[in-house]
Amino acid sequence: MPDITSLELVSWDNVNSNDRTFSSLTDLVINCCKNLSSLEQFLQPASMPIIKKIEISDCGSLESVPRFGDLRFLEELFVSHCQIIKSQRLFAPSLKKLDLENSGNLGGSIECSSLNILHLSNSPLESIELQMWKLP
């Protein structure tokens, strides 16, 4: 079986990584998975050890994202139109580019010590408290 370096999940509502290992995966797109509520079990470093880019969009039931800190090669994260995310803290020390567009409450506390690009748009944040953010 050839190595997979890019994986796109479109309308896949029963995501489970217990029996899947994508050791060569570097890019992941999760789009329109309407019933997906959490990525905790799916986005594990053991199943995706060298993931570099994650795009998550139009997942209307997504409530939480994992600690990305254990994904030590993750450089880019794009979250769009996932309005009910309630994660108060985003921890991703290797992240270089963060794009949050209409992304619920994902930007309350950001700890991304390698971040070069931050793009916030249509955010429900009422204020930005930079002292809560640990940015370079």
Image: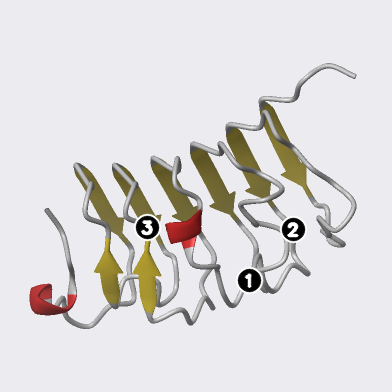
Residues 26 and 35: in front is 26
Residue of label 3: 92
Residue 42 image offset from top left, x and y in percent: 72, 59
Q: Residue at x 30, y 58 (%)?
A: 121
Residues 60 and 19: in front is 19
Amino acid bearing label 2: Cys
Residue 12 image offset from top left, x and y in percent: 83, 53
The span from disc 1 to disc 3 (Cα, nearest Å) is 19 Å
Numbered disc 1: secondary structure: loop
Q: Residues within 10 Å of mark 2 (few under 14, many from 20)?
A: many
Q: Residue at x 68, y 50 (%)?
A: 46
Residue of label 2: 33
Residue of label 1: 62
Disc on the earlier residue, 1 or 2: 2
**Residue 8's quadrant in the figure?**
top right
The span from disc 3 to disc 2 (Cα, nearest Å) is 23 Å
State whether residue 114 is above or below residue 41: above
Amino acid bearing label 3: Ala
Residue 82 image offset from top left, x and y in percent: 54, 66
For the residues bearing labels 1 and 2, Cβ distance under 8 angstroms: yes
